[in-house]
Image (cartoon, helix red, strand yellow):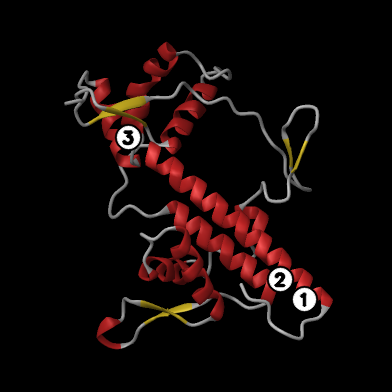
Amino acid sequence: MAMPPNLTRAQVARLDELKFRVGHALQNFASCRRVEREYMDYNDSLRFLRDAVRGKFPAEGTRRRIHPIIEIGISIKLEQRGLRSGGSAEDVAAILPEFAKAVPIKRGRPGDTTLNHTVQGLMVAWRWATGRACTAKLKDGNDKYTPVSTSRGSDLIVRLIQEADARATSYTILRAIYESRKAVEGKIFSDYFPLYGARVAPDSGAPILGPGMKLEKFIPAHPIYCSVGTAR
């Protein structure tokens, strides 16, 4: 981001802070994208668990872990059973039939949670630094479902996201901006990125969060892997 001329010292400091926040958001975005490549899709994970409960397993091939949200849900279920240490593999197997049946498959086109989260965080950062909202609107006429940018902040977010992920289209990013107008109201940057600005405790290496935030200990269940495809 180029620095505009004739800025006051306070404005320069605010823009410098904006650069740090943007860098943190994009680094988090890139890390999440790497993790996503290692995990199964949410719905595919549920289908695998339901097949496993019925004794049906795919052919051996590339091993991938089930979706992290599914793993967290299993861990929470174990905690509800009083198994706060994450439980054993047998404990996980015991709750799978109930869990797989209770959690519904997501209908419709799956949303991009990582992109939406990052876009909203960047929208909040831009509003904090400039006092102006990132906006988009739907085109008029026959192309009325296509979003277009109506602010410099939105233009910047499209460019930043596409530089971080070449597969992200301007349509998807602007649609996320358009649909996030209400979601970002009253939000601050730490609502999206609570580890931003955190310090590290020298004795334990644990992050020390900012005021009003507390890090709770959470022990996940055993990782669950699925073989995808064939080994041949």
Label 3 near label 1: C-beta < 8 Å? no
Three-letter code for the amino acid on which mark 3 is drawn = Ser
Residue 41 rendering spot, x and y as whole percentages: 33, 41
> 37 or 124, which is in the foreground?
37
Alpha carbons under labels 3 and 2: distance apart:
42 Å
Single out the mark in the foreground, 3 or 2.
2
Q: Is residue 86 above or below residue 178?
A: above
Q: Residue furthest left?
A: 232
On the question of residue 188 being in view, the answer is no
Residue 203 rendering spot, x and y as whole percentages: 80, 27
Q: Residue furthest right?
A: 9
Mark 2 residue crowding within 10 angstroms, few (<14) / some (14–19) / many (20+): many
Q: Residue at x 46, y 52 (%)?
A: 114
Label 2 near label 1: C-beta < 8 Å? yes
SS for dot 3 = helix
Three-letter code for the amino acid on which mark 1 is drawn = Gln
SS for dot 2 = helix
Reading the image, the residue beneath label 1 is 11
Earlier residue among tags 3 and 2: 2
SS for dot 1 = helix
Reading the image, the residue beneath label 2 is 15
Reading the image, the residue beneath label 3 is 45
Mark 1 residue crowding within 10 angstroms, few (<14) / some (14–19) / many (20+): some
Earlier residue among tags 1 and 3: 1
Three-letter code for the amino acid on which mark 2 is drawn = Leu
Q: Quadrant of residue 25?
A: bottom right
User: Is residue 48 rendered to the left or right of residue 169?
Assistant: left
Quadrant occupied by the N terminus:
bottom right
Q: Quadrant of residue 121?
A: bottom right
Q: Residue at x 54, y 23 (%)?
A: 79
